[in-house]
Image (spheres, helix red, strand yellow):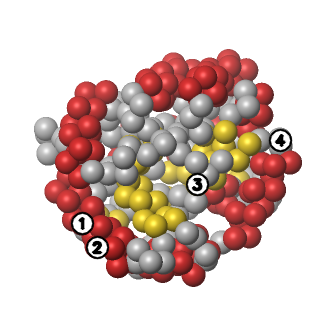
Amino acid sequence: MNKAAADWRDDPMFSKKLSYRRNFAFFPKKLSDKTWVWWAHYYYVQQNLYYRDHERAFRTEDVFPKFISEEEYILAAISAGYTELGFSDHTPWHYESGYHATMRMDESQLEDYVHTLSVLRDKYKDKISIKIGLECEYFEDKMEWLKDQLEKYKLDYIILGNHFDGSDETGIYYGHPVSLEELKKYVSQVIKAMDTGLFSYVAHPDVVFYDESKQEHIDELEKICIHAAEIDMPLEFNLLGYKAMRHYPSQPFIDLCKKHHNRIIIGTDAHEPSALKDTKTYNRAYAYLKESGLEITEDIKMLR
């Protein structure tokens, strides 16, 4: 954890090397005393933890839990009373350079991912419906490759989680504070992705770290709400960000959703099985959205 700043714009981590933004994600969290601290985002690859030390003052064992199997998520969902559970792990991408991304499985692991979930889907078919999907960015030059994988593995659905500009190999990470020009790129990519007809909904649409104090940023982000309403695509209210007090979901974006009558889907974004049992956070979010006058939906378009 870095030293807290009175505001994230004053934190030196904000201006660290571009490689940080490309290779590792940091999220700001606002504490009860109104200061900001930075939490590391972490990922599992082949049951091994890829950890990069970025001057953090906490112990890794305090942050990183043990490896968790897909079956544990299913058992947690059944225990919590779910009738259907969708898996949407971060999609792999094909990198001509052989680049290894830390936030997603390797391309070679996709077959095992689908096979494992297919076996579990059959095993628990009398207790819960399992849908197999992926969370994907809009990387324009890789969309044909993605379409081939969707057909090859007969995936049920994909959701749009646009974390990077064009590629996580070369592009910036949108979860860090962005300029207006960077925000425009993000919005353009999200709208193009929506128009492909491939995605069921937009995951954490306000993950892009825009400046809430600037009307030009809010006006730009509004274009996502306008277009989503036009094509009737749900926008996600992300429970992981909500519970962790990240910069998303953000109040200005919620206000925009209300203005344009967007349908909202509550996504658990469960990085551990216990998140599926956290009815307290879900109910709090549900009540908040209802009080805000938003329409909550559980219906999404499937690929097949």
Q: Nearer the viewer, mark 4 or mark 2?
A: 2
For label 4, count other residues whose C-alpha is less than 10 Å away and answer few (under 14), some (14-19) or many (20+): some
Residue 37 visible, this orientation: no
Question: Disc 3 or 2, which lies upstream in sequence?
Answer: 2
Residue 52 placement: quadrant:
bottom left
Q: Position of residue 200 (x, y in %)?
A: 48, 42
Confirm or deny contact between disc 2 and disc 1 (CB under 8 A): yes
**Callout 4, which amino acid?**
Gly
Q: CA distance from mark 3 to mark 2?
A: 24 Å
Q: Position of residue 217 (x, y in %)?
A: 65, 23
Disc number placed over residue 115 in the picture, else none: 1
Position of 170 with respect to 230 (left or right) is: left
Mark 4 lies on a secondary structure that is loop
Q: Residue at x 16, y 57 (%)?
A: 108
Q: Residue at x 52, y 41 (%)?
A: 201
Q: Position of residue 10 (x, y in %)?
A: 65, 40
For label 2, count other residues whose C-alpha is less than 10 Å away and answer few (under 14), some (14-19) or many (20+): few
Question: Disc 1 or 4, which lies upstream in sequence?
Answer: 1
Return the residue at label 4: 293
Mark 3 lies on a secondary structure that is strand
For label 1, count other residues whose C-alpha is less than 10 Å away and answer few (under 14), some (14-19) or many (20+): some
Residue 40 visible, this orientation: yes
Q: CA distance from mark 1 to mark 4?
A: 41 Å
Q: Residue at x 70, y 42 (%)?
A: 250
Return the residue at label 2: 119
